[in-house]
């Protein structure tokens, strides 16, 4: 008996959203056909409706399996990702398996791309008093002073050591071994072979020489300085006579400065510091010249320190600026604390470098603290055992050590820290010379892990011990 396919049956088939196309076709193919070879017009109309319903069911079913019943916006064929290169995906994850992941990949690709300037832009190093060559500003504490300096006040006001008597005793004992040391009455003329730590008449010359000597050996700093001398020449007259022509260095490309001093080590960093310092000094010299001239004509206040300068010193400042002879000699007219703050504003100049310039060039009592002084003063118990570094040590010892002992103790501690078999940083019990003893042995309590043990009788050098951080202890 023939079964007629009605419109209601067609609607039911279209309503089967989850049925695959193959099932729909199977159901249609199983329907008995009329015995007549030519279907009637009614049957053709019904089959047309069936085919349309099947196509509709196929599209709806495919969309249903992908979206799991969620409504989605229609997308044009141009926006559909046909295939993704596996090499373009992170970690070679392969093709995106569904349209949902394809759309997510498309969304990522549609994010606005960074412009080349946004990707390559780096912080610009400016000649800013608080700016250094690393692109970071110097930290200024709540008291308004950089590096946490506390001029005239100890950061450890309740710590009573060292006493003046202790300072006198240590100075006397070290002098018996290293000789008596007195501060010179005059500053020597600059050397072209020895960089030094500021023992020259020109403040600018002293500042840069001390910068060159930092964090390296005296031999390396001498190589760097001699390279600058050979490349840029020396001044033939004036207070900076015999030293480098710093204005020529200022006007030169930074690569020329780097090439001139690269044999001395740390040239990339120090060449940037020097260039920035010289640019700042040049601008300040022009500003001070204009302020001095205005003070002469209008009676206005002059620049910092001008009230302590003679008329000859003021005129010399003006002349140097007019002739592009860079100078920081006005710092001679500042008091010690003002000079410290004026010097540490320059890139790469910290309290230790500034203190050396004040001690050796300005010839003011100032207790510069280097690594040897810091170590020995801790062993002497002159510093708190915790929360102390070289900067806070400087601020504390600057207050506690009598002025007349600052020059000699600075020099004696450095000499002793370099050559004493027991107070060197690279020594330990059993090191060569340990049995010779130490003149201040009864006053110190050496702390920290030691290194540099004596060569054993088998001729093998014992391995240095390392702490848990992987750094050799003191």
Image (spheres, grey):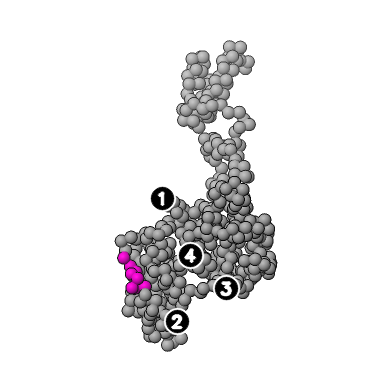
Disc number lying in front (3 or 4)? 3
Name above or below for residue 380 compared with residue 277.
below
**Residue ID for mark 3:** 188
Residue 418 seen by the camera = no
Dot 2, how many residues are within 10 Å of its Cα: few (below 14), some (14-19), or many (20+)? few
User: Mark 2 or 3 closer to N-term?
Assistant: 2
Q: Element type at marker 2? A: loop
Q: Are marks 4 and 2 in contact (CB under 8 Å)?
A: no
Give the mark nearest the N terminus, 3 or 4: 3
Residue at image mark 1? 142
- Mark 2 or 3, which is nearer the eye? 3
41 is higher (above) or lower (below) than 132: above
Q: Which mark is residue 179?
A: 2
Residue at 53% across, 39% down? 97
At x 68%, y 61%, the residue is 248
Which region of the structure is painted magenta?
A: 160-167
Name the residue: 41% across, 50% down: 142
Left or right of 404? Residue 305 is right
Q: Quadrant of residue 201?
A: bottom right
| Mark 3 Cα shell of 10 Å, populated few (<14), some (14-19), many (≥20) | few
Q: Are marks 4 and 1 in contact (CB under 8 Å)?
A: no
């Amino acid at each position: 008996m023939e079964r007629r396919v009605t419109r209601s049956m067609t609607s039911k088939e279209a309503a089967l959203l989850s049925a695959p196309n193959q099932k729909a076709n199977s159901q249609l193919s199983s329907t008995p056909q009329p015995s007549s070879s030519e279907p009637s017009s009614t049957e053709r109309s019904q089959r047309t409706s069936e085919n349309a319903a099947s196509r509709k069911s196929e599209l709806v079913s495919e969309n249903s399996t992908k979206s799991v019943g969620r409504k989605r916006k229609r997308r044009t064929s141009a926006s559909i990702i046909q295939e993704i290169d596996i090499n373009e995906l992170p970690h070679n994850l392969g093709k995106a398996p569904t349209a949902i992941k394809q759309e997510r990949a498309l969304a990522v690709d549609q994010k606005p791309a960074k412009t080349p300037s946004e990707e390559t832009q780096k912080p610009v190093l400016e000649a800013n008093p608080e700016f250094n060559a690393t692109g970071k500003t110097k930290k200024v504490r709540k008291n308004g002073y950089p590096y946490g300096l506390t001029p005239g006040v100890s950061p450890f006001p309740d710590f009573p050591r060292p006493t003046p008597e202790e300072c006198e005793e240590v100075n006397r004992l070290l002098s018996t071994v290293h000789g008596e040391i007195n501060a010179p009455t005059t500053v020597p003329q600059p050397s072209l072979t020895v960089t030094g730590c500021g023992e020259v008449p020109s403040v600018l010359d002293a500042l840069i020489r001390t910068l060159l000597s930092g964090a390296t050996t005296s031999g390396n700093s001498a190589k760097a300085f001699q390279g600058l001398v050979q490349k840029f020449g020396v001044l033939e007259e004036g207070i900076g006579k015999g030293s480098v022509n710093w204005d020529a260095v200022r006007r030169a490309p930074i690569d020329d400065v780097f090439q001139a001093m690269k044999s001395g080590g740390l040239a990339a960093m120090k060449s940037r510091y020097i260039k920035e310092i010289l640019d700042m000094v040049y601008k300040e010299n022009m500003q001070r010249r204009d302020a001095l001239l205005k003070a002469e004509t209008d009676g206005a206040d002059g620049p910092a320190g001008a009230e302590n300068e003679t008329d000859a010193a003021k005129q010399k400042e003006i002349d140097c600026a007019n002739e592009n002879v860079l100078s920081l000699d006005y710092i001679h007219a500042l008091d010690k604390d003002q000079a410290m703050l004026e010097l540490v504003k320059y890139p790469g100049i910290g309290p230790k470098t500034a203190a050396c310039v004040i001690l050796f060039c300005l010839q003011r009592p100032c207790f510069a603290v280097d690594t040897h002084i810091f170590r020995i003063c801790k062993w002497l118990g002159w510093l708190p055992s915790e929360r102390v570094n070289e900067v806070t040590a400087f601020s504390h010892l600057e207050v506690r050590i009598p002025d007349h002992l600052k020059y000699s103790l600075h020099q004696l501690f450095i000499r002793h820290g370099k050559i004493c078999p027991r107070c060197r940083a690279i020594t330990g019990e059993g090191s060569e010379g340990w049995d010779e003893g130490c003149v201040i042995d009864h006053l110190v309590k050496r702390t920290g892990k030691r290194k540099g043990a004596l060569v054993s009788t088998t001729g093998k050098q014992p391995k240095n011990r390392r702490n848990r951080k992987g750094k050799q202890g003191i």
